[in-house]
Structure formats: C-alpha cells, structure tokens
Image (cartoon, rainbow, N blue to C red):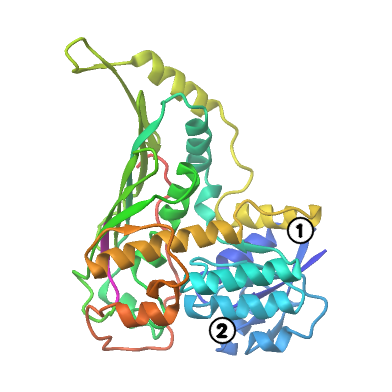
Amino acid sequence: MINVAIVGTGNISQNHIKGYLEFKDRCKIVALIDIYPEKAKAKAEEYSLKDAKVYSSHKDILDRKDIDLVSICTPPYVHAGISIDCMKAGMNVLCEKPMAASLEECDAMLRTSEETGKMLGIIAQNRFRDPIMNLKKTLDTGMIGKIVWADIDSYWWRGHSYYDLWWRGTWEKEAGGCTLNHAVHHIDMLNWMMGGCPKKVNAVLGNVSHDNSEVEDTSVAVLKYEGGAMARLTSSLVHHGENQKIEFHGEKAKISAPWNVFASDSKGNGFPERNNSLEEKLTEYYEALPKLTHEGHTGEIEDVLTALENGTQPMITGDSGRNTIELITAIYKSGFEEKSVELPIAKDDPWYTAEGIMKNVKPFYQKTKSIENFEDQNITVGSDYKYF
C-alpha cells in the first residue's frame, strides 16, 4: 500500500484526490496539508478521507516515515522548496505543473532526486488523453513524413476576477501568466512529440484584457528546430470557447488533435492534389489504437503508482518538466528583450534564476486586488481534444 500526502488543497487538488481514490487497493491518502487548514479539513470531509490527518505546513510531515508519495498542488513559487524538502525526507514527489519558477530551481529538484534516489514526477496530464496519446503514436509511425511545421493553439478564457486571487497575477508568486501556467500543457506535448526543445525562439508578449495583473494574458512564439522544422505557439486567456489544437504538418500529410487529417500530393505544376488513400490509412491506424483505461490526472497517477511499485520511472519525469520550463523561459526572454533567443539557456544567463527573471520582466499592470479564496471552487481544465 502506497501512503500519499497532498500538499495544497485548492482547486486542482480534487483531481489528485479523485485519482488516488480510483486505486484504493493500491494507495491511501494519509495527510492533507494547506496553509489554510480549514480547506484541508473540508476536502477530508468532502471525500470521506478518514485516515487523512490535517496539517498547516508541509514541514509538519517531514518526520513521518510512513508517507511514500507527496502530491504537490501549491502555487508555483513554492514547488521547488517543498519538493526538495520531501525528497530529502525520503518521500517520492508528484509535482503539479509548472515544475518550478526557474531553471535553477528545476536543476536543484533534479539534483535532489538523483542524490536521494527518490522519484520526481511532474504533472502533464494531457498526455494521458486518448487523442493526444494516439496522435503521438501516429506521428511515430512516420506515415506523414518528416515534420516540417506545427501549429499549437493554447486557447483559454479567464475573466477579470481570475487574477483577484492573492497569488495569481504576480511575477513573484505565479512566476508568469498564460505561457507558464496554461500553455505549459501544450509546450510539454510539443516537446514530447518533437523530441525536444527548439533551437531558436522569437516571441511577442502582451496583456490585452487583465489590467489587474502583472503577467501576460497572451503570447505568440515562432520556434525553429534543428533540421529546419518550425512551429507557431499561441497562448491566450482571451479566446472564447477555448478551442485548443495541436497540429503537425509532415511532408505528406497533416494530423491533429482534435483528430483531423489531410494529405496532399503534388501535381506536375506543384499545386496540391488530395491523397485520399493516405488519409484513409492514417485514420484507420489511428482509430484502431487502444483506448486508455484511465485519462487525465487519474491516468498519470496510475502511471506513477505503477512506477513506484515496479521501481521504474514514470512517463513524465523531472527532465520533461525542465524542458518545458526551458522553452517557456526562452519565450519570456525573447518577448521582453525583443530579440531571438537561442537554446539551451546557460547557467550564467540572467534568465536562469528566479531572481534574474524578476529583474528582467516588465509588469504589464499593477495587481490591484487580492482575496484569499474564492467562494466558488469549481474549475474547468480546458479541451479534451475530441471533436468539438
């Protein structure tokens, strides 16, 4: 039996709790921690977690030798510190996205994982959705040919009051806007499907609709990869309908999630001629792929539990989380410095540390309102990448 603690019992924690409760024969939630203990108590009552003891600080559990795994569901600026403390105390970690506020913090987390031998997993639950998993498998067949272009729409919509919550909308505590905290999902998927980070980034940042927030609510980045492939990544909190898309164009065809396929052959004069045969072949392959037993957070939690039981690594490791942060950091550097940025980002680069980021970002607006908690705790987590 794997004993689990959950640090941070705000909105996203319910996805972790529900996930663990799907596997009652394999794990048990034994601790809930929140700086607002009443929130942890409410979660314990809501989900009938009778074995879960409530604490007000993660430091209060560090002496417990019965905790095997800690889910970290706090604001980003404390992800690194809590993760490192827990791993040093002998606990494995599953940390919510984004992994940390800076590459320096990511590297400290990875170093601690290596030194302690404890697992470090990072939440990127959208990989555990049938349309995304099966898009990746279809890409890996090579049937569309060499990838030459990717189009990524990380479209979300958040009202003005979204940034009233005390830790949101500040560079110090949220560590970024839609690029870091929303497009993080799409950036993880893009890196996964492309096999790593691009070599060059050009980006534009803006805040067009949230004047109570220091951070961006829109960003557009053009990426260039070794070998010549390019991509366009748009992140937004102003797109009604949140119609998200991840699309890859190969030499022979395009495929995307939500699933869509179009294949072209060249006529003698260079104009396109539709290749129905290849489209049918791609669709037949895609539709024959097996469905996941569990999707989203539950799917990733099942993968983590299996890794702990078998002494292996989960699908989404700290290295994957770091790659995501590196690309996001490059987008911020390019946007604020208004120039092309080459990757990787060196350790002596000012953007490598949280302090350096704070010195180089330019707040779009001043945060004007701060409330401790919303009464309405219901949230949505975006597209499921199925047909709209």
Picture layout, residue 9 above or below residue 253: below
- Specify the farthest residue to the front: 348
User: Type of residue at label 2?
Assistant: Lys
Tag of residue 308: 1
**Real-space Cα separation, disc 2 to disc 1, in angstroms:** 29 Å
At x 75% / y 53%, what residue is drawn? 312
Q: Is residue 360 magenta?
A: no
Please report the bounds of the magenta region as a residue range. Answer: 215-220
Instruction: Choose mark 2 or mark 1, whichever is in front.
Output: 1
The three-letter code of the residue at mark 1 reads Leu
For label 2, the SS is helix
In percent of width and height, residue 339 lies at 23, 62
Identify whether 151 is placed above or below 34: above
Dots 2, 1 in contact, CB < 8 A: no
Q: Nearer the viewer, residue 284 or 206?
A: 206
- Tell me residue 308's x, y (percent): 76, 58
Give percent across and percent down for residue 303: 67, 52
The numbered disc on residue 39 is: 2
Which residue sits at x=63%, y=88%?
57
**Disc 1, SS:** helix
Q: Residues within 10 Å of mark 2 (few under 14, many from 20)?
A: some
| Number of other residues with Cα within 10 Å of mark 1, as a class: few under 14, some 14 to 19, many 20 or more | some
Specify the quadrant that holds the C terminus: top left
Q: Is residue 286 above or below residue 265?
A: below
For the N terminus, give its image quadrant: bottom right
Image point (64%, 77%), residue name: 84
Residue 29, picture quadrant: bottom right
